[in-house]
Every structure is written in structure tokens, then in C-alpha cells.
Image: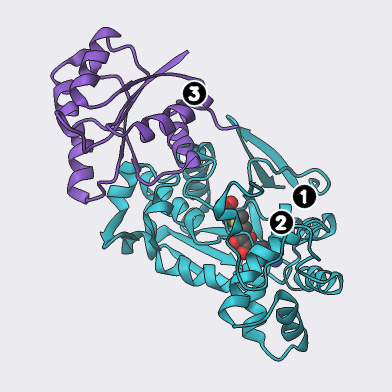
Amino acid sequence: MTNPNPISRLEYPGSQGANAAPLISPRNYTFLQTYIYRESGIVLDDDKQYLFESRLRPIVIREGLASIDALCDLVATGRSPALATRVIDAMTTNETLFFRDTAIFEVMKTTVLPELIAAAGSRKLRIWSAASSTGQEAYSLAITLLEARIDPSRVEIIGTDLCEQVVERAATGKYVQFEVGRGMPILLLMKYFTKVGLDWQIKPEVRNMVHFQKLDLRGSFAALGKFDLVLCRNVLIYFDATTKEQIIASIAKTILPGGMLVLGCAETLISVDHKYERKVFGHSTFYAVR
Amino acid sequence: MKKALVVDDSRAIRTMLSRILVRYGFEVAQAGDGSEALVVLEQHHGDFDLLCVDYNMPVMNGLELLSEMREQPRFDDIPIMMVTTETQIDFITSALALGANEYVMKPFTDVMVLEKLQTLGLVPYE
Ligand SMILES: C[S@@+](CC[C@H](N)C(=O)[O-])C[C@H]1O[C@@H](n2cnc3c(N)ncnc32)[C@H](O)[C@@H]1O
């Protein structure tokens, strides 16, 4: 038997064996790399054939196109902005979960948020979840504030993302079971969600604490105003060094004196740390703006 | 070594959960329903760091097991993670009232179980 696993023989129209010509022509591969870099800043290396294939194939099928090459040709004409947006949306990695790196949220609840709210005085505390994806991070923050017994009317949370689809989804505050099964402690699920059919709807008191909008991190943040706390987690990894530095520097300008930035747990600030001061709470690192 | 007891009537689920738990440093015992679990608990003098409990099982179901365990204060400190297809609010509320600490809804993936183990403080964040 050459192929013991029948499932791996299932083929979709246009699929080819492993030894056949690449599924995307070299010219279009370069086109996609450049296009996605230009539109999102995301760097895709030369070995991401499989990623383009798995992320773009559904669009090809839904549009009834012959191949990914045909899709590239269509996008390149610039005549279908909606299609172009879908290509960018498909190439962003939206993986997220509630209370990602739980330790950070614990420290926020016990130390950081109470301190920031005290420092804010009569002013509203403003928090930004930059690259909020489907909203889990922003809602985890809202729940953390409620759990810290901070009056929600004293807080404003903004979530932003480049990808339109996730911004729309985040705003609904509705999650499937698989999503609430990831990171949301069961006691908090019972307290802050209602079950709607098979899905889980975040309660209005939490949802109303957060607003979502589309925003490219490489653009201007002027319209957002200033923040006490910014979370920019698990997104910088997709950019090149220059883009990263620019974003970190622009974020610094949006943070009020004494305010802080939080990165993903595997991310650190090395090159542009002159604007920031490292603050370590337990196992969690925050960057305070000088 | 941390010890876990997996209670499920499906051998496939027991095997899958055990494999995940072993990977994160647990020694794993198994039971096919609530009454078997009580026997195993007895034999080990309640010396477990985690109990994974299904609901729908023959002889004694998961909630009955939790009620039985509540009768015995020496089992009070064992963290209990329900692993079940039951997702009705009433059901979850009863499980929590009977002492369940976490809840994994079937179908689950390895990473979901890991995240719950982390939430319970049984596995460190890397
Ligand atoms: C892996 S998710 C991280 C979500 C969340 N912050 C977390 O840590 O779980 C990365 C998000 O970054 C967004 N993204 C990618 N490029 C972006 C850009 N140029 N501007 C804004 N958001 C971007 C993606 O759409 C995606 O939702």
C-alpha cells in the first residue's frame, strides 16, 4: 500500500500531489508577500507556501475561482477591495484566549489597577487592548476590573485590530463553547455570561465597558487619546524590527506619565527601552513610561 | 509526583486525559464510574492532587460521586475538574455547588486541558 491513510487522499479541486509544481507560482508568492507586508506589516518568510495555501484556499473555493494564482490576479487588479480585505483578514493570525498569561491579570487585579485608578483621581482610567483580535483580552480586562471592585463608570476600555472580521465579532461579545473553554475560569463564566443556545453571551455590564474599532498599528494613534495602560501582546512578533520599534515608540506617546505597557509573555523590549522603565511584579513584566 | 484520578466510563477519554496528564508530570489512576472512583480514593487515602470527573456514567454518575465525596471531609481538599458534555447552566451550577473547581466541556483539546491545569495552579505557565 502506498497510502495507508485514506483521508490524506481526499483532494479538493486543483490540489496536487506533493511532488507536483508549487500551488502558488513564484511570481504570485512574491506578490502575496509584498502585498501582505504593505497592507499589514506582517512578514511572511519564503517557506510559508502551506500557510498561504491553507488560509487562502477557502476564499478561492467560496469565490469559485480556479486557483490561488487566479485570486492573486484578481487582488492585483485593485478592483475588488472587499476581496483584498478578506485576503488580509485571512492572513492575520487571530489566535487568542481569555486571561492569556493569567499571572498578568492576577497582578493587575491585586496591584496595578488599584494603583492606576488611585493615581487617576477623578479622571477616567483609560485602557487600550491593541491588537484585540476577537475581544478576549479586552473582556478579560473588564472582568478583572469588576473583580477588583472598581466602579465600571470610572473606566474606559478600547480594543482595536486591523482585521475587520474580528473587530465585528469582538463587539458582539458572543463566544462559542470552545472559546469560553479556553482560559475563562468556570466561576467567572457563570458570573459574567449567559448561555444563548449553544453559545455564551457576555453580559451587557461587561460588554458596555469595552469599545472596539478597526485600527492599523502602523498608523496614527492620535484619535485614540491617552492611556493609563496599554496591552500590546502577541502581535509584534509578526513584524520586522523597524516596524516593531516604530509601533513601540508611537505607543509610548499615547501613554500618560506613570502609565504602563504590557507585552506578551515571550516578548521583551530591548532596543527602544529608553522611553520605558521595566517594572517586575512577581513573574510579570510591565513597562512604565518615564 | 502529582497524582490524578480520571473518572470516565469511556476508555478512549480516560486514555486521552491520562496521556495529557502524564505529559504534565502526573501519575494517573483511572476509574470507570463513581463507585469505582470511591474505591480507588479509599485505597489511596484520598491522596490525589486532581480528580477529573465525567458526568454520564453507569452505576454512579459524576454528581453522585461529588455528593458522596462531600460526606467525607478528608476528600475536601482535592481539586475537582468536571470533564463533560453537559453544558446546561443548571448542571454547571450544581457541579460547582457540590465542590467542582473547574470545568472542561467535551469535546476538548490538549491545550484546553493544559490551560485549566494552569488555572488550577497544578502546572506552571512556561
Ligand atoms: C495573535 S492575535 C493577539 C490577540 C491578543 N492580543 C492576545 O494576545 O491574545 C494578533 C492580532 O494582531 C492583529 N494584527 C496584525 N497586524 C496588525 C496591524 N498591522 N495592526 C493592528 N492589528 C494587527 C491580527 O489581526 C490579530 O488579531
Chain A image colour = cyan
**Height in image: A94 above or below A66?**
above
Of residues A209 and A61, which is closer to you in this image?
A: A61
In the rendered image of the structure, the colour used to display chain B is purple
Could you tell me residue A64's position as x and y percent?
60, 83
Total tally of numbered discs in the picture:
3
Q: Residue at x 49, y 60 (%)?
A: A135
Residues tagged 1 and 3 counted as in contact (Cβ below 8 A): no
Q: Quadrant of residue A95?
A: bottom right
Tag 3, which secondary structure?
A: helix
Name the amino acid type tagged 3: Val
**Mark 2: few, some, or many residues within 10 Å (few <14, many ≥20)?**
many
Q: Is mark 3 within 8 Å of ligand 1?
A: no
Q: State whether residue A167 is above or below residue B126.
A: below
Ligand 1's quadrant is bottom right
Q: Residue at x 46, y 57 (%)?
A: A122
Q: Is residue A83 visible?
A: yes
Within-10-Å neighbours for mark 1: few <14, some 14–19, many 20+:
few
- The Cα atoms of the two marked residues, 2 and 1, are separated by 7 Å
Tag 2 and tag 1, C-beta contact below 8 Å: yes
* Spatial separation of the CA atoms under disc 2 and disc 3: 44 Å
| Residue that badge 2 annotates | A252
- Discs 2, 3 touching: Cβ within 8 Å: no
